[in-house]
Amino acid sequence: MSPDICARCASSNWFGSLMSRLAPSFEHYRDRYRNIALERDVHGVLLVRFHTAGGHFVWSEESHEELAYCFADIAADRDNRVVVLTGTGDVWCETIDFASFSLSNPAEWDHTFFDGRKLLGNLLAIEVPVISAINGPARIHPEIPVMSDIVISSEHTLFQDAPHFIGGIVPGDGAHIVWMHVLGPNKGRYFLLMGEELSAQEALQRGVVGEVHRQADVLPRALEIAATFAGKTDLALRYSRVVLTQRYKRLMDEGLSLGLGLEALAAVDLLAGLKQ
C-alpha cells in the first residue's frame, strides 16, 4: 500500500466514506421490486414486507429472483442497522405459481440454480440482525423466515414444506439444511419427508420460533425489538450477526449446490415422466 493511501486511511474515515460512495443508497433500490415493499426509519430499522400486487405473497419465478437481488441490496447498504421481514395480511406465504417457472431442462434450471444460491447466500450476507415477524401460515419456503436471528410468529401460523417431497420434488434448495439444523437430523427429515405441519405452539416448544403473539401484535413486537437493537453500536450489531450466522454459512457452502443440483435432476425426471 502506498504512503499516500496509508495517510488517507489514517486520517478521518476514508474507508467508510469510500464504502458509502460505492454502496447502493436506499433511494436506489427502495422502489425497485414489484413483490417487496421497503420502509426505513431514522434509526436504520428496515421493514421488508413481502406481497404480490399488494396482497398475500405468492411464490413465483419473479419473486424468487427479486428476493435474491433485494437481499444483496440490503446487505450492501450500511445504513441498514436492523432488518425486519414480514408478509402481508394474515399469510406469510402458502401459494406458489408453478406455471411461472420454466424447469424442464438444464438451461432453464440454471436460472433457478443461480437465484437459489444467491437468495440464501445474500440473506446470510446481511451483516445486521434480522428479525422475522411471521404473520400467518408459511407453507412455501418457510426456511427463509426461520433463518432469522429472532423469529416471532402469530398464533395461527403453521410451518410446512409444502412444495417439495409431497409433490415428488427433492427438498434440496436449502430446506434440507435449515430444517435439519433447526429441528435436528431425525425430526428435520421427518418434517420434510412427511409433509408435517408444525403449529405455532409446537414451533415454540421445539425452538423454531422465539415468541408467539396475537396476529395484531406480531409486527409491533418485532419493531419493538428492532428499536431496542438499534440502540446498540454499529459494530455490536454487525459483528454479532457475523458470529451468529457463521455456522449457517458453512452449512450452505457444504450442501446447497449439491441439493439444488439433485433437486433439478429429480424434477426434470418427474416432468419427463408426466409428458409420457
Image: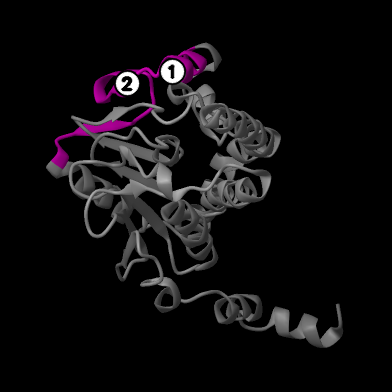
Which quadrant does the C terminus fall into?
Answer: top right
40 left or right of 192 in image: left
Residue corresponding to mark 2: 198
Q: Nearer the viewer, residue 251 or 2?
A: 251
Q: Quadrant of residue 170?
A: top right
**Residue 195 painted magenta:** yes
Three-letter code for the amino acid on which mark 2 is drawn: Leu
As drawn, the label of residue 138 is none
Where is residue 33 drawn, in percent x and y? Answer: 39, 66
**Residue 33 painted magenta:** no
- Tell me the colour scheme of the image: one colour
Where is residue 90 drawn, in percent x and y? Answer: 18, 42
Q: Are marks 2 and 1 in contact (CB under 8 Å)?
A: yes
For the image, the number of numbered tags is: 2
Q: Residues within 10 Å of mark 1 (few under 14, many from 20)?
A: many
Residue corresponding to mark 1: 191
36 left or right of 119 in image: left
Which region shows up in magenta? 187-215
Residue at the extreme right: 2
